[in-house]
């Protein structure tokens, strides 16, 4: 039986989806999170990975609070670069094991109008994006033969707060919500991203991959679809990003081109509205 170690598997949005998918596909799954020890302690990490003897280590731990990262760049860097860097070095020293590390569409500036593939030059606008880019480069540099870096985007799914859930919660309290209409991305279901990531790992794929559901949307379109699927009467008012200031600058257009993934799967990743419907139905909301 293949063995996976999932960092962030107990509490993370994507980590929990990975645990479910891997277990469903017959993997033996172990998790590693802050309750097990200090992940930034190299000796602890080394001992844990050595004892774990995982065939694949999935790193879904990250500093994901992009706005707060602007005020805490060192802490964000520790989780988003130092940790994956350490994981790659430990696995390199151990001489076995694939590292699957997750990154973000926020490595792109997103000033264009066409979907971004893996060959596109990153130019992050925020501390979060910069630290994520440094993390991917560290992993691919340290462990080129045995690392898989997966950029994903705009995640929704069970187990932890996410944009779709926050929209639906707001609709229970208000008749009208205002949502940004001039930023476009790739809404993605954690269960799908977890499945495709597992398939890539099972296929011993390495290198950089874009993994997201097909199609694109603005935040406003994603919110409207979620509201409409749940039969909520709440109005979704489109507003420009300039009316919803954030500490961290966000790309205007960061749609991921997943053609490489589609070629691997032999079909297009399913469209995000279909995945959203499944998520909301599973949650008992649709
Ligand atoms: N969410 C998105 O829309 C999105 C989009 C693009 C890319 N991604 C990438 O996908 C990956 C997973 O994201 P996610 O949304 O699943 O993240 P998440 O839900 O915020 O989970 C992050 C995980 O990291 C853990 N963590 C944070 N600080 C820690 C620390 N100091 N020590 C130990 N564990 C710590 C958290 O544990 P606690 O629960 O204990 O804090 C949690 O398990 C990340 O690499 C992220 O950059 C996410």
Image (cartoon, helix red, strand yellow):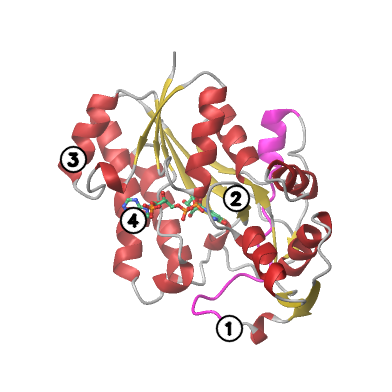
Residue named by callout 4: 79
Quarter of the view holding residue 50: top left
* Upstream in sequence: badge 3 or badge 4: 3
Task: Provide residue 111's location: percent of width, then percent of height.
Answer: 66, 71
Left or right for 234, reference 157:
right
Examine the rendered structure and indicate whether residue 159 appears above or below residue 21: below
Q: CA distance from mark 3 to mark 4?
A: 15 Å
Residue 114 among those drawn in magenta:
no
Q: CA distance from mark 4 to mark 2?
A: 25 Å
**Label 2 with label 1: CB-CB less than 8 Å:** no
265 magenta-colored: yes
Q: Earlier in the sequence, mark 1 or mark 4?
A: 4
Residue 44's disc number: 3
Which SS class for mark 1?
loop
The answer as to whether callout 2 falls within 8 Å of ligand 1 is no
User: How would you classify the magenta stretch by its main secondary structure?
Assistant: loop
Q: Residue furthest front?
A: 173
Q: Which residue position holds label 1?
A: 245
**Is the CB of the residue bearing disc 4 within 8 angstroms of ligand 1?**
yes
**2 and 3 marks in contact (CB < 8 Å):** no
User: Quadrant of residue 211 in the image?
Assistant: top right
First of labels 2, 1 by sequence position? 2
Say whether disc 1 or disc 3 marks the residue closer to the N-terminus.
Answer: 3
Give the magenta range.
246-266
Rendered position, 167 above or below 19 = below
| Numbered disc in front, either 4 or 2 | 4
Observer-nearest of 268 and 41 = 41
Q: Residue at x 58, y 72 (%)?
A: 250
The quarter of the picture where residue 281 lies is top right
């Amino acid at each position: 039986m293949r063995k996976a170690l999932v960092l962030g598997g107990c509490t993370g949005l994507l980590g929990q989806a990975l645990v479910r998918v891997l277990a469903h596909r017959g993997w033996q799954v172990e998790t590693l999170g802050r309750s097990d020890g200090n992940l930034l302690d190299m000796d602890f990490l080394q001992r844990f990975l050595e004892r774990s003897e995982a065939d694949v280590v999935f790193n879904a731990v990250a500093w994901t609070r992009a706005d707060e990262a602007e005020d805490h760049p060192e802490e964000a860097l520790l989780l988003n670069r130092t940790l994956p860097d350490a994981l790659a070095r430990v696995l390199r020293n151990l001489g076995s094991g694939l590292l699957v590390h997750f990154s973000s569409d926020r490595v792109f500036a997103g000033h264009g109008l066409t979907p971004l593939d893996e060959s596109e030059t990153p130019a992050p606008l925020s501390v979060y994006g910069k630290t994520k880019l440094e993390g991917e480069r560290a992993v691919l540099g340290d462990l080129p033969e045995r690392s898989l870096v997966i950029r994903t985007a705009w995640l929704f799914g069970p187990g932890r707060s996410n944009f779709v859930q926050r929209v639906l919660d707001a609709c229970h309290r208000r008749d009208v919500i205002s949502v940004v209409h001039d930023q476009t991305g790739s809404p993605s279901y954690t269960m799908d991203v977890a499945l495709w990531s597992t398939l890539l790992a099972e296929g011993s794929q390495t290198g950089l991959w874009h993994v997201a559901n097909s199609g694109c949307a603005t935040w406003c379109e994603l919110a409207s679809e979620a509201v409409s699927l749940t039969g909520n009467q709440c109005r979704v008012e489109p507003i420009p990003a300039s009316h919803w200031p954030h500490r961290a600058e966000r790309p205007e257009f960061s749609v991921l081109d997943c053609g490489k993934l589609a070629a691997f799967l032999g079909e297009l990743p399913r469209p995000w509205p279909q995945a959203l419907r499944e998520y909301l139905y599973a949650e008992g909301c649709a």
